[in-house]
Image (tube, helix red, strand yellow):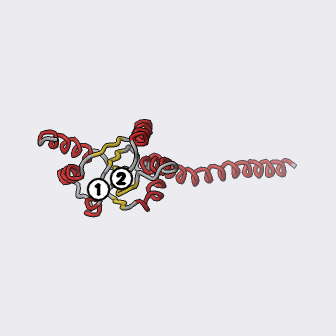
């Protein structure tokens, strides 16, 4: 790979890192060609971009991102073979890795960057898979906000029936 190609990769990765809030550094080094192709196919189906890139190019791209400071613990994981995973939702790569590892030893999670938080190590896989997407969190908030309103409406509806019966009883007593 010549300097021009390296520079193009760094610029492309810098753009990608600038525009994403979620990416994973993984190790899929011992997977055979058939398994790597299977992993790539699953990633494509789930709209997860997967790339194998040299660590020095990843580091230079991360350092070139303007307005973001990446934690040193993330940069320290740039050793050995590294496979990048980019996703639209924070938990999608973790769920994919968890599912894929039911039949394979790898990929292992080296580190994950999720909205300015860094998760280091494969032991973080369950925590990453449990993260909720923005849409899920908004749905939870809406449900929480709806609950008191539903209680008030229910109370008003039942109170209206009681009030109507009370007025009817008073009316009947007055007529008698």
**Tag 1 or tag 2, which sits nearer the N-term?**
2
Image vertical order of residue 39 relative to residue 155, above or below = above
Numbered circle sitting on residue 122: none
The local crowd at label 1, few if under 14, some if 14 to 19, many if 20 or more residues have their Cα within 10 Å, is few
Tell me which residue sits at (52%, 50%) in the image.
102
Find numbered disc 2 in the image and state the secondary structure of the residue it sits on.
Answer: strand
Identify residue for label 1.
Answer: 80
Looking at the picture, how far across and down is residue 121, in whole percent?
38, 61
Q: Are marks 2 and 1 in contact (CB under 8 Å)?
A: yes
Residue 65 visible in the snapshot:
no
Quarter of the figure with residue 34: top left
Residue closest to the eye, 154 or 114: 114
Q: Is residue 99 left or right of residue 14?
A: right
Viewer-proximal residue among 61 and 68? 61
In the rendered image, residue 135, in percent from the top left (x then y), is placed at 45, 46
Residue 19 appears at what percent x and percent y?
Answer: 27, 44
- Name the residue: 29% across, 59% down: 77
Visible in this render: residue 144?
yes
Which element type, helix, strand or loop, lies under badge 1? loop
140 up-or-down from 49: above or below:
below
| 154 to 44, vertically: above or below | below
In the picture, measured across the screen, residue 88 lies left or right of residue 142, that is left
* Quadrant of the image occupied by residue 80: bottom left
The residue nearer to you, when weighing 135 against 59, is: 59
The furthest residue to the left: 3
Residue 27's label in the rendered image is 2
Tell me if 56 is positioned left or right of 134 in this view: left
For the point 23% across and 50% down, which residue is it? 58
Q: Residue at x 52, y 52 (%)?
A: 145
As measured in the structure, the alpha-carbon distance from the residue carrying label 2 to the one carrying label 1 is 8 Å
Mark 2 neighbour class, 10 Å CA radius: few under 14, some 14 to 19, many 20 or more: many
Along the viewing direction, whichever of 20 and 169 lies nearer the viewer: 20
């Amino acid at each position: 790979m010549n300097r021009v190609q390296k520079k193009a990769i760094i610029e492309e990765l810098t753009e990608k890192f600038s525009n994403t809030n979620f990416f994973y550094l993984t190790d899929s080094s011992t997977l055979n060609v058939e398994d790597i192709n299977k992993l790539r196919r699953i990633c494509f189906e789930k709209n997860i971009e997967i790339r194998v890139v040299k660590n020095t190019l990843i580091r230079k791209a991360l350092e070139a991102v303007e307005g973001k400071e990446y934690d040193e613990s993330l940069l320290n994981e740039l050793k050995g073979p590294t496979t990048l995973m980019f996703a639209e939702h924070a938990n999608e790569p973790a769920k994919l890795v968890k599912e894929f590892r039911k039949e394979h030893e790898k990929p292992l999670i080296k580190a994950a960057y999720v909205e300015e938080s860094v998760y280091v190590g494969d032991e973080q896989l369950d925590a990453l898979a449990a993260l909720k997407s923005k849409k899920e969190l908004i749905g939870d908030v809406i449900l929480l906000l709806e609950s008191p309103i539903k209680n008030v409406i229910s109370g008003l509806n039942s109170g209206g029936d009681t009030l109507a019966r009370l007025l009817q009883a008073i009316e009947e007593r007055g007529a008698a």
